[in-house]
C-alpha cells in the first residue's frame, strides 16, 4: 500500500492511499460474504448461493458499491498505524478504482496546530475597583419598593412617582403630524432613569386630557436626529411606594430576614459581591484576550464549526420546543458570530498547551475540597459527591480551568484603578 501525506495548511492535510488488487482481495472477500447473506438468487435459498456465483453475477456492483467503506477502513488503519490524530470528520475528495488492479483515493482531514507558546506570564492588566456607596444601597431599596408599589388614578402629575399614559404623535418641522408615526397608550414612568429628560420635562405637572410637546435628540447610526413629539395625556397614575420597614422586609424575603437594617446590610454585601465578581470577570476576559492576541494561530474549521453549533443549540434553547422564529436566518447568525467562535477555538488550543506545559491536573485533594464546598449547597452527602466527581471529566476539566485562571492572575502584573460609578 502506497501512502503519501500532503500539507495543505498548518491544520489541514491530504492523505493519498493506493492499494493493490492483492491488498483489496481479502477485504472484498469479507464484503462478498456479507452481501451474499442478503441476496436472493434464483434456484437457491436466500443467502445460500455459492460465493463464485455471487461474484460472477454481482461482483462488480458489490465492489463499486463498497468503495466508500473500503476507503474508510484503509484510512482508519493508516491513522492508527501512523499515530495521526485527526479532528472533525474526514472528507473523501477523490476516488479511482480499476477493478482487478488498484484503488486510489484521497482524504482531507484536520489536525490541531502546533501551538508555540508566547509569553503568558507577567501580562500587564488593569483591575477596576468599585466601592459601594450609600446611594447605591438606597437606589436598590427604592427599586424594590417600586417593584412592590400600588397605583391610584389621579388628575395631575405632582412628582416623578407617576405613570403617565400618552398617545405619541411624531411631527414634522412645521408641527404637522406625520402619517403612520403615531403610538397609542404608551406608559411612561417618570421616575425611570431611561426616560428621555425632554419627555420627563414635558410631562412635569401635566394634567389629564392635556397635550404636551417635546423635542428629543436621538442618536441613530452615529448621527443625531431630532424627533418632535406631541404627547396627549390619556391616564395618570400615582405610584404609592411601600415604606421600607420590618414588615416590608418580611414580605419580600418571605420571613427569611425580619429587620430592615439587617436587610440593608445584606444588600450592601450583595452589591459588593456583584461588583467584585464583575471586576474579576472583566480582568480575566482582558487577560485571556491579551494572551490570544499574542498568538497567531490558524484554527481548524471543524473547531470553529463546533463552537458555532454549540451557540446555535444554546440559542434554540431560548425558544419553546427549541423552535426558532420563522424569520430566523441561521447563516446570518453563524456569520455574525464567526469572529467570536474563532477566538474561542484559539483560546481552547492555547489553554490546552499552557495546561500541558504547567502540568496542571485535578488531583483527589482538589476534588475533595470541591465536594466539601458543594455538599451543603447541593444537599448531597460529601462522600457520594466526591465519588461522582472522581468519575466526571467535566468536573476535572472545570477544576483544571480554575487552576489555570488562578495561575494567570497570580502571574499577571495587575494595576488597580478606582471605578467611580460603573465598570467600563
Image (cartoon, rainbow, N blue to C red):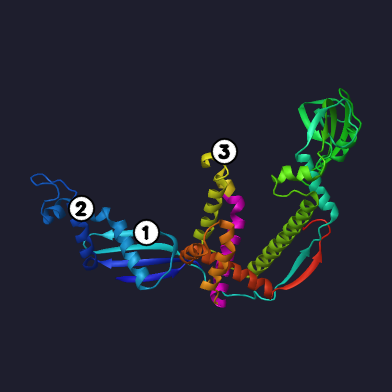
The residues tagged by marks 1 and 2 sit, at their Cα atoms, a distance apart of: 25 Å
Extreme residue toward the left, this view = 43
Q: CA distance from mark 1 to mark 3?
A: 39 Å
Q: Residue at x 50, y 62 (%)?
A: 385
| Numbered disc 3: secondary structure | loop
Secondary structure, mark 1, is: strand
Q: Secondary structure at mark 2?
A: helix
Give neighbour class at mark 2: few <14, some 14-19, many 20+ (Cα, 10 Å). some
Cα distance between the residues tagged 3 and 2: 46 Å
Main SS of the magenta segment? helix
The residue singled out by tag 3 in the image is 325
Q: Which residues are magenta?
A: 334-358
In this view of the protein, which residue sits in the foreground, 308 or 177? 308
Q: How many marks?
A: 3
**Disc number lying in front (1 or 3):** 3
Q: Which residue is mark 1?
A: 94
Q: Is residue 88 left or right of residue 54?
A: right
Amino acid at each position: 500500500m502506497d501512502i503519501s501525506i500532503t500539507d495543505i495548511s498548518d491544520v489541514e492535510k491530504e492523505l493519498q492511499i493506493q492499494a493493490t488488487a492483492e491488498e483489496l482481495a481479502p477485504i472484498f472477500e469479507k464484503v462478498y460474504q456479507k452481501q451474499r447473506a442478503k441476496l436472493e438468487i434464483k434456484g437457491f435459498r436466500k443467502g445460500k448461493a455459492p460465493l463464485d456465483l455471487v461474484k460472477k453475477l454481482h461482483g462488480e456492483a458489490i465492489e463499486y458499491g463498497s468503495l466508500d467503506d473500503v476507503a474508510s477502513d484503509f484510512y482508519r488503519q493508516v491513522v492508527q498505524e501512523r499515530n495521526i490524530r485527526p479532528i472533525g470528520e474526514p472528507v473523501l475528495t477523490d476516488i479511482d478504482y480499476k477493478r482487478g488492479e488498484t484503488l486510489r483515493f484521497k482524504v482531507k482531514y484536520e489536525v490541531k496546530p502546533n501551538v508555540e507558546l508566547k509569553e503568558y506570564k507577567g501580562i500587564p492588566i488593569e483591575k477596576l475597583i468599585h466601592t459601594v456607596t450609600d446611594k447605591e444601597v438606597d437606589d436598590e431599596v427604592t427599586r424594590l419598593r417600586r417593584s412592590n408599589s400600588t397605583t391610584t388614578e389621579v388628575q395631575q402629575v405632582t412628582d416623578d412617582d407617576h405613570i403617565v399614559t400618552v398617545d405619541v404623535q411624531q411631527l414634522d418641522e412645521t408641527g404637522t403630524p406625520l402619517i403612520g408615526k403615531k403610538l397609542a397608550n404608551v406608559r411612561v414612568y417618570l421616575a425611570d432613569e431611561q426616560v428621555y429628560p425632554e419627555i420627563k420635562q414635558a410631562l412635569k405637572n401635566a394634567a389629564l386630557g392635556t397635550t404636551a410637546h417635546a423635542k428629543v435628540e436621538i442618536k441613530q447610526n452615529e448621527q443625531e436626529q431630532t424627533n418632535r413629539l406631541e404627547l396627549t395625556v390619556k391616564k395618570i397614575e400615582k405610584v404609592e411606594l411601600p415604606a421600607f420597614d420590618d414588615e416590608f422586609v418580611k414580605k419580600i424575603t418571605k420571613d427569611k430576614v425580619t429587620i430592615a437594617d439587617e436587610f440593608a446590610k445584606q444588600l450592601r454585601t450583595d452589591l459588593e459581591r456583584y461588583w467584585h465578581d464583575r471586576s474579576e470577570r472583566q480582568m480575566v476576559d482582558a487577560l485571556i484576550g491579551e494572551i490570544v492576541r499574542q498568538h497567531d494561530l490558524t484554527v481548524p474549521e471543524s473547531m470553529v464549526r463546533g463552537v458555532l453549533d454549540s451557540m446555535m443549540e444554546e440559542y434554540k434553547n431560548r425558544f419553546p420546543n427549541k423552535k426558532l422564529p420563522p424569520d430566523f436566518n441561521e447563516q446570518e447568525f453563524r456569520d455574525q458570530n464567526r469572529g467570536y467562535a474563532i477566538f474561542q477555538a484559539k483560546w481552547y488550543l492555547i489553554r490546552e498547551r499552557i495546561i500541558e506545559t504547567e502540568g496542571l491536573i485535578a488531583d483527589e485533594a482538589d476534588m475533595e475540597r470541591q465536594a466539601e464546598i458543594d455538599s451543603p449547597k447541593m444537599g448531597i452527602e460529601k462522600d457520594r459527591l466526591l465519588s461522582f466527581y472522581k468519575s466526571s471529566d467535566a468536573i476535572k476539566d472545570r477544576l483544571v480551568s480554575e487552576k489555570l485562571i488562578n495561575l494567570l492572575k497570580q502571574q499577571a502584573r495587575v494595576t488597580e484603578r478606582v471605578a467611580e460609578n460603573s465598570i467600563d
